[in-house]
Image (cartoon, rainbow, N blue to C red):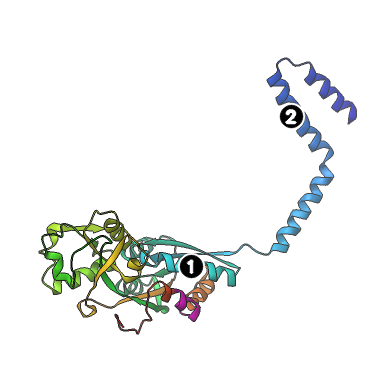
Amino acid sequence: MQRGVGTLIRWIRTQAGRRRRTALWAAAVLALAGSTGCGAGGDAGRASTGEAAANGPEPVELLVSAAASMTDSLNEIKRGYEASVPGVRLTFNFGASGALQQQIEQGAQADLFVSASERNMNALVDKGLVAEADREPIVRNELVVVVPASDKLAWSAVADLSRAEVKTVAVGIPESVPAGAYAKEALTRAGLWDALQPKTVQAKDVRQVLTFVETGNADAGFVYKTDALSSERTKVAFAVDPAAYTPAVYPAGVVKATKHPDESRAFLTYLRSKAAADVFARYGFSPVGAVPGS
C-alpha cells in the first residue's frame, strides 16, 4: 500500500503546470482517503443510519389549498399546529376558491380544501371529490368596501360608488372569487352591477383587489373585513349590507384523493378547535353562527 502511494506521489510531482498539479494532488488525497478509510466509512454509515432511526420517520406533509383571504390566519395556525403535532408539516396553496376548486377537479394534489364559499365546496362534494362527512364549516367573514387611507369622501353604501369622483372599482372575478360573487350579488340587488361596469376592474383574488386600492390603481374595492384589517394603506369605507349577499361561510373538507386521510381529518378537527378559533378571531373572522356587524 505504502509503495503504491509513494509511486503515485512521485508521478504527480513530475507533471508540468501548477493548475494540473493541484488537480492531481486532489485526486491523490481522494485515493488515499478511499484506500485507508474503508473501515471508518462503514462505521460512519452505521452511525448515520442509527442517527436517522433515532430521529424517527419523516414527517407527513399535508398540502392545504386555501382561500387567499386566509393567508395570514392559516400561517399563524401552521406554527402552532406543527409545534403541537411534530409528525406533520403543513404546506399551503393560497388562491381564489374557484381556481383552487378547478385545480382539484383537474387532479392537482391536495389533502384539504378550505374555501371562502360553500358553492365551491359543494361542487367538489357533488363530483365525489370530497365526502360530505369530511367537510365542516369553519368561520364566517364579512364583505366591506375599502378605499385608500387618504380618501376624504363621505361613504355610506354601495350607491356611493356611482359618484363621478369614483373612477375605478376593484372586484374579484365573480366566477372564481367568492368575494367578487358576493359583491356582484350586492350590486345587482342595488341595481348597480351593469351601471358600474365601465369603471370596474376585476382581480384574480381578493388580495389583488386590496393591492389595487393600496397602490392607487382603484379608488375603491370589495374585500373581506379580514383583508381590510391587514392593511395600513386602506380603510373601510362601509360594510356591505349582509342581507344583500349570501353569507360568507368558509367550509373546509378532506380531499378523497389524499394519501394521508387520518392526518388530514385530524387537522380538519383542529381547525374547529378553540385554539384555531382564537387565531381566526384575531384576524377578524367570526364564528359560523355569528351575525355580521355584531
Mark 2 crowdedness (10 Å alpha carbons): few <14, some 14-19, many ≥20: few
Q: Residue at x 68, y 21 (%)?
A: 19
Identify residue for label 1.
76
Q: Nearer the viewer, mark 2 or mark 1?
A: 1
* Residue 257 visible in the picture: no
Kind of residue sitting beneath label 1:
Glu
Q: Position of residue 84 (x, y in %)?
A: 59, 72
Quarter occupied by the N terminus:
top right
Residue at the right extreme? Answer: 2
Q: Secondary structure at mark 2?
A: helix
Q: Main secondary structure of the magenta part?
A: helix
In the image, which residues are magenta?
271-279
The front one of 282 and 114 is: 282
Q: Position of residue 230 (x, y in %)?
A: 37, 65
Question: Which label is found at residue 208?
Answer: none
Residue 141 lies, with reference to residue 166, above or below; the image says below
Q: Secondary structure at mark 1?
A: helix
The front one of 70 and 59 is: 70
Kind of residue sitting beneath label 2:
Ala
Name which quarter of the figure residue 105 lies in: bottom left
Mark 1 crowdedness (10 Å alpha carbons): few <14, some 14-19, many ≥20: few
Verify CB contact (< 8 Å) between mark 2 and mark 1. Answer: no
Would you say 107 lies left or right of 153 here?
A: right
Would you say 230 lies left or right of 78 here?
A: left
Q: Position of residue 12 (x, y in %)?
A: 78, 21
Question: Which label is found at residue 27?
Answer: 2
Could you tell me how far apart the alpha carbons at marks 2 and 1 are, in whole angstroms? Answer: 51 Å
Q: Residue at x 27, y 58 (%)?
A: 213
Instruction: Return the disc, 2 or 1, that comes first in the chain's sequence.
Output: 2
Would you say 73 lies left or right of 16 here?
A: left
